[in-house]
Image (cartoon, grey):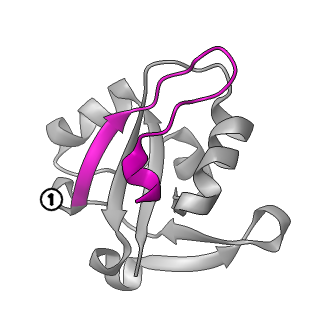
Amino acid sequence: MPNVFKIIDQAGFDAIAAEGKFRGAAIDFRDGFIHLSTAAQAKETARLHFAGKTDLVIFAVDATALDDRLKWEASRGGQLFPHVYGTIAPSEILWSKPLPWNGEAHEFPAEVFA
């Protein structure tokens, strides 16, 4: 199964180590699950929800590590999006990278599409 991705601000990412788990961002708390994206969905997610925002991080999680916490549910345009019901442990995060804004779009690290 492929990696799935979360875009979050740096402060939220830094809090993962302090809390010992990732419980989500404000939108996740509101909706009752952690919103993730596939590699094919990540750029549109950034465009729709994070345009113009700086100080962002993208991190990857191996979808298989999320076991039964991961649900694929229809969302934007009927696409199936990965949603986590529960938390993500720091040990489940494969890597994290800055997601810089270039004035027009976010510049994604090559690892997202590898």
> Which residue is pictured at 27% across the width and 76% down the height?
65
- The amino acid type, in three-letter code, at marker 1 is Ser
Residue with the most extreme top position: 103
Q: Residue 67, position in %: x, y?
A: 33, 83
Seen from the viewer's position, the closer of residues 9 and 111 is 111
Residue 102 appears in the figure: yes
Seen from the viewer's position, the closer of residues 11 and 55 is 55
Looking at the figure, which quarter contains the N terminus? bottom left
> Which residue is pictured at 65% across the width and 76% down the height?
73
Does residue 104 show up magenta in the picture?
Answer: yes
Q: Is residue 33 above or below residue 45?
A: below
Q: Which residue matches tag 1?
A: 91
Q: Is residue 3 above or below residue 35?
A: below
> Which residue is pictured at 53% across the width and 59% down the height?
39
Q: Residue 78, position in %: x, y?
A: 81, 73
Does residue 80 show up magenta in the picture?
Answer: no
Numbered disc 1: secondary structure: helix
Q: Residue 102, position in %: x, y?
A: 58, 17
Q: Residue 9, position in %: x, y?
A: 44, 29
* Horizontal relation, residue 86 to residue 36: left or right: left
Looking at the figure, which quarter contains the C terminus? bottom left
Residue with the most extreme right position: 77
Q: How many marks?
A: 1
Seen from the viewer's position, the closer of residues 105 and 94 is 105
> Which region shows up in magenta?
93-114
Categorize mark 1 by other alpha carbons within 10 Å: few (<14), some (14-19), many (20+). Answer: few
Seen from the viewer's position, the closer of residues 17 and 108 is 108
Give the quarter of the image for residue 93. Answer: bottom left
Residue with the most extreme bottom position: 68
